[in-house]
Image: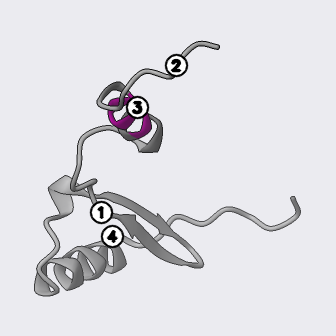
Amino acid sequence: MTAKRRLVPTSEVRDVLDLLRDYGVDPSRVIIDIRADGVSFTPPNQEPGNDFDRWIQKDQNSDPVAHR
């Protein structure tokens, strides 16, 4: 990589956090990734676990497969 890595100024970080709060996002509950080329944030899951955990839970509630 030939480009130098730059840290984002603290004032810009504060501006992003204030903007998220203005939009009603609680910064303590999301994953915020502030980079030199932009900002992304991931909101918390509404349901516990991931897709695999929900699939297993759904599978446990179904009838067992008949053996042949």
Q: Position of residue 41 (x, y in %)?
A: 38, 67
Residue beneath disc 1: 43
Residue beneath disc 3: 59
Disc 4 from disc 2: Cα separation: 62 Å
Mark 1 closeness class: few <14, some 14–19, many ≥20 residues within 10 Å: few
Counting residues from the start of the chain, the first of labels 4 and 2 encountered is: 4
Eye-nearest disc, 4 or 2: 2
Q: In the image shown, does 53 or 23 lie closer to the viewer?
A: 53
Mark 4 closeness class: few <14, some 14–19, many ≥20 residues within 10 Å: few
* Quarter of the view holding residue 22: bottom left
Are the residues tagged 1 and 2 within 8 Å (C-beta)? no
SS majority, magenta: helix
Q: Position of residue 1 (x, y in %)?
A: 87, 58
Disc 1 from disc 2: Cα separation: 41 Å
Counting residues from the start of the chain, the first of labels 1 and 4 encountered is: 4
Looking at the image, residue 1 sits to the left or right of residue 50; the answer is: right
Disc 1 from disc 4: Cα separation: 23 Å
Counting residues from the start of the chain, the first of labels 3 and 2 encountered is: 3
Name which residue type carries label 1.
Pro
Eye-nearest disc, 1 or 4: 1
Q: Residue at x 16, y 86 (%)?
A: 23
Looking at the image, residue 2 sits to the left or right of residue 53; the answer is: right
Q: Residue at x 88, y 64 (%)?
A: 2
Find numbered disc 2 in the image and state the secondary structure of the residue it sits on. loop
Disc 3 from disc 2: Cα separation: 14 Å
Residue beneath disc 2: 66
Find numbered disc 1 in the image and state the secondary structure of the residue it sits on. loop
Q: Is residue 59 above or below residue 38?
A: above
